[in-house]
Amino acid sequence: MSYSPRSPNPNQSDENRRLYNPYQDLNIPAQTLYKLPTSPEYLFQEESIAQRRSWGENLTYYTGIGYLGGAIIGAGKGLTEGVKAFEPADSKKIKVNRILNSCGKFGGKYGNHAGIIGLLYAGMESGMVAVRDTDDIINSVVAGLGTGALYKAAAGPRSAAVAGAIGGLAVGVAVTGKQVLKRYVDTCSCRNLFLMKSCSW
């Protein structure tokens, strides 16, 4: 015997029914529950005071960016090396295999090296911030010096000194360029906003 639901009677009164409000016991207006703050939320108060990444975020960021950038550069070099290794008798399948093998070889190698550099830099920069209790360009430059020197320490003191100087110079140029670019972009955006308001008037 099959079940057939009864059709609702449109003439039946709704006096025995009521609307359910899930927020009635909270004693607050329901619309305020959906007014989310636009500023970042922090678990601890001291996190809102320091406007910078934590050491764990630094470690993840620089290591990941270093590995990804190194892998892309290595894959590009592997592509050129794989194309150079073509032989006239190679089929299309063998050519693709040469390119893939070369990209994987150089991509992994360059990615590992760049990831290690990012790991060393993140650790040294976070250590400088913890020791000096401030976040400025000095921390970045010293971290670059230490990273280059430590990365080439096994090759001798001369190589370590040269690599440290290159690392410190590269980080100094990068940080300075970032600040100049940020100031230039902010100035241009403010100028464009002023021009837009002037035109609207």
Image (cartoon, helix red, strand yellow):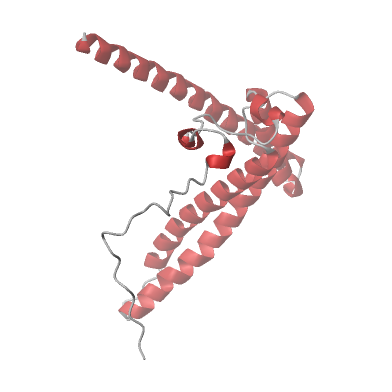
**Percent of width and height locating residue 42:** 63, 34
The image quadrant that residue 144 belongs to is top right
Occupied quadrant, residue 83 = bottom left
- Does 148 appear above or below 187? below
Relative placement, left or right, of 156 versus 2 is right
Quadrant including the N terminus: bottom left
Q: Where does the C terminus fall, quadrant-wise?
A: top left
Q: Is residue 36 above or below residue 185?
A: below
From this viewpoint, is residue 187 visible? yes
Residue drawn where x is 42% and y is 54% of the image: 16
Whole-percent x, y for residue 70 in the image:
53, 52
How many numbered discs? Answer: 0
Residue 90 shows in the view: no
**Residue 192 position (above or below residue 86):** above
Residue 157: x percent and y percent?
76, 40
Task: Name the outermost residue toward the right.
Answer: 131
Tell me the residue at 47%/67% (across/down). Answer: 102
Q: Out of 174 and 194, give the one closest to the viewer.
A: 194
Q: Nearer the viewer, residue 31 or 63?
A: 31
The residue depicted at 36 percent of the width and 72 percent of the height is 86
* Residue 196 at x, y percent in the picture: 25, 15
